[in-house]
Image (tube, rainbow, N blue to C red):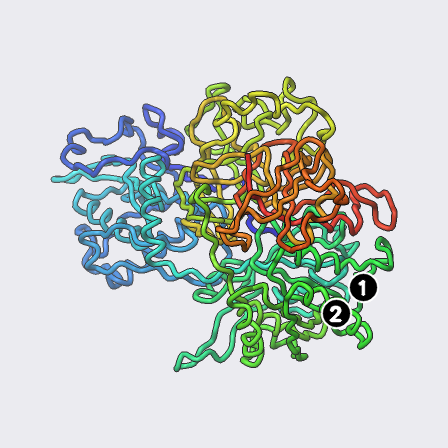
Amino acid sequence: MASIFTFQPDPPRVSSPWSTPPPGSQPRQSIPQESASDPPLPAIDWQAATTNANTLAVDYSTVERLEAEPQEGPTEYKLHLLLRSRRSSPPSVAIPSRQHRLEQLTTQLLWRLQQSCPYHLSSNSLVVPHFPTESELAAPAPPQRLLPNLEESRGALYEIGVADDGTFVGLVHDEMEESLNNLRAMAASLGCRVDVLRMVCVGETQTEKLWVVEAFVHPGRHNDAAAADMASLDHSTDDDHQTLPQQVRVSLTGATLSGKSSLLGTLSTATLDNGRGKSRLSLLKHRHEIISGMTSSVTQELIGYHDVVDHQGTRTSTQVISYGVGNVSSWADIHSSAEDGRLVFISDSAGHPRFLRTTIRGLVGWDPHWTLLCIPADESSGRNSASTSPESDLWQAYLQLCINLELPLVVVITKYDLATKATLRQILSKLLTPLKDTGRKPCIMPSNVVDGADLNTILPVDLHQADEIVQTLRESSLTAVPIIFTSAVTGTGINALHAFLRELPLPAFRVPSTNIPRTLFYVEDVYSSRATASRSISPSNGSPDQSAIIGGHVRYGTLSIGDELFLGPYPTDTGSDDSDGSSGRASIQNSLAPKSRSFPGALHNPQSGFHPSTRPGAFANDKHAEWRKVRITSLRNLRLPVRTLHAGQVGTMGVLPVDLPIASPAVDRIRKGMVLQSGGAKANRVLSVRFGGADAAAVTSLTVGSAVVIYVASVRASAKVVSVAAEAFPRIPSLGVPEEEEEDGDDAGFGFGFGFDNEDTPSGASTGASQASATVVTFQFIASREFVEMDAKVLVLPGGGPGLSGGTERGEKGVAGLEGFVGRVIEET
């Protein structure tokens, strides 16, 4: 339950039984070992087949039988697929009704197709396929929409005319043709196609020959042209037929020991906590998290909501779809049960400042629609006696960070069962003041104690109270901040929080600017690389390339299986070899130190005057060095195999490289912060960020040449300050200033000057008294070039900082580590 997806490292292989006939029954020529990847044969020409006695250039005359049919796996032996009795059958043999037999055969085909899926979904929800009718058998229709859970199926092999023990029985050509027509109709009802791989004459009657046919049933073809056909088919069918539930991304944040994981465990399992972290055990990834009680990694959970309506269409209640429901055992069950409802993808994060990098990735990289700030009612994490000074409240630093980032916010007061009037009064006074100062209206929602058995049902009273507050958030999610009191021990406020998660509005879709690719996917996780049977062979060593599995969210556009896009930007100093077995180290002639794949440049000295990737002309002809063309081979949306990912959805995908010159980097050298885009994007070394409001004066404390850490979208990279300049007026209309009022600001100050016209202006002060004054800071990435959107939100954290309580523990940056500067990109080069 702790990760978004699980991939099978060794997926089942579709292997033809003709490849391994019984001993003593071998063909005169070798048979391809991977018949499923053979090109499809043309339509059966029985007259030509009778003359040739075989449609393949392989002599099967010595193959007398096959191995016995395997009980499991994607191979099925059938004497025939007729819906009537054979002419040679005795008249006394009774057969079931035609429709009943057709349904049985289709269900059997579905099971065989599921056997070759790399990941077997343990869904308890039965999806009944559309069984073909007898009228559809004469002329099978094109494949319908692919049945769920078959998106990654490798296909199934049908040996028609073969007994279960492998003995050849054979069918005459009209019975074989009828059997194949029935198989095509069954496959089309599941969204699949049928290719005839081989046809062998195994005997003859007095008038006709007897045939055995091997047919391959699969969701899509295995060649490039057919993959493009399937991609176009997906774009047309998904949009017309698929009804997608709303998907909301929510991030949990807050100080350590604030009860975030326990709250998420209660929400996702409907299990009350025992006061010692029982409800969070299923979320933890590492043993040290259980021992210390502190989360150090990001975990995700999925919760679904399904409205219950009466005969008049009025909502009477809402059902929570989680692991607390008896028939839910996987995310696939949640997808199925929450159809036409809402899916909430919740990410938990670490609270201790030493894991600040992980926390900010959850707030900035995943681009959550809403953020839940957890504050303990007993102030157990307000002053962490082990690390934080008494005068500094850590949760206030997290609150200020969320306000600076302009995140849509919901405040959750946890551990309400341990609260006292004095502590609640103190917490609310510290909470309401900064909210009111920023113009956000606090809205406190009353919470009631409920029985634990009712945690799976949201009552109308909770939905009504949540809807009253949500009405103020529909126009703008920054106008108000709901405040909810909860307890994972008694169940207080859990239903109220569920009601908010069900009713919170989705933010308006942001239209991309003209210089942004129409399709954009941010890479947030890199799971693994796996060897594939790709026909793309590297000219350097002749070894097959590898596919990689990446995760993230779709910013713009739509992604479908078979789409070819550009992945990058790759660091250009990782060497020019195309070996996918690379360890990710830089080439010796370019750099002497290895680079972190998730944080490149971490070991580089920012004071050094030379970096391999900044040498003159390093990026003159690096189109193939920075971007590599890849093809999407599989897609999953929150663990559910799909054919298409839409804008705003979270998912993972398998990508396979498309042939490029040898200078292109290996596909498995992927790091967090890359993007998958449709073309036209460029990587940037330098970017200018505009800071307004209070940050306009505070950011002037940065000195030229100082090191900082920049968070922008999925990018986390070290950079250095190139220049700081004052700007009297904003430059871009998207920040609230009419276009006709825009003027060029003061001349940018490069080098060691700050560009202030008034020499008497003290350092750190704004040049104007009005709130419209701004400061423009230019940064240069140290390690590599990055893809950055225009007008993207940027969080800049100064490097270093004092340790907690004056300590010098490595990695601890103190509360000052949360105090960054937030601006927006106005120019990148």
Dot 1 corresponds to which residue? 380
Q: Nearer the viewer, residue 341 or 518?
A: 518
The residue at which mark 2 appears reads as: 415
- Could one spot residue 71 in this view of the protein? no
Q: Is residue 371 above or below residue 629?
A: below
Q: Amino acid at mark 2?
A: Lys
Label 1 residue SS = loop
Position of residue 605 measured from the top left corner of the image (x, y, whole percent):
73, 29
Q: Secondary structure at mark 2?
A: loop
Quarter the C terminus occupies: top right
Q: Is residue 31 left or right of residue 397?
A: left
CA gap, disc 2 and disc 1:
9 Å
Residue at the spot 27% in from the left edge and 44% down from the top edge: 161
- Residue 81 coordinates in the image, percent (x, y): 26, 51
Instruction: Name the spot of residue 290 as percent of width and height, x first.
Output: 75, 55
Question: As displayed, is residue 57 above or below residue 110?
Answer: above
Above or below for 110 versus 47: below
Q: Are marks 2 and 1 in contact (CB under 8 Å)?
A: yes
How many residues crowd around disc 1 within 10 Å: few (fewer than 14), some, or many (20 or more)? some
Q: Quadrant of the N terminus?
A: bottom right
What's the amino acid at mark 1?
Answer: Ser
First of labels 2, 1 by sequence position: 1
- Nearer the observer, 477 or 496: 477
Relative to 598, is 92 on the left or the right?
A: left
x 59%, y 66%: residue: 479
Question: Where is residue 603, by image quadrant?
Answer: top right
Residue at the image point whose x is 47% and y is 44% from the top: 520
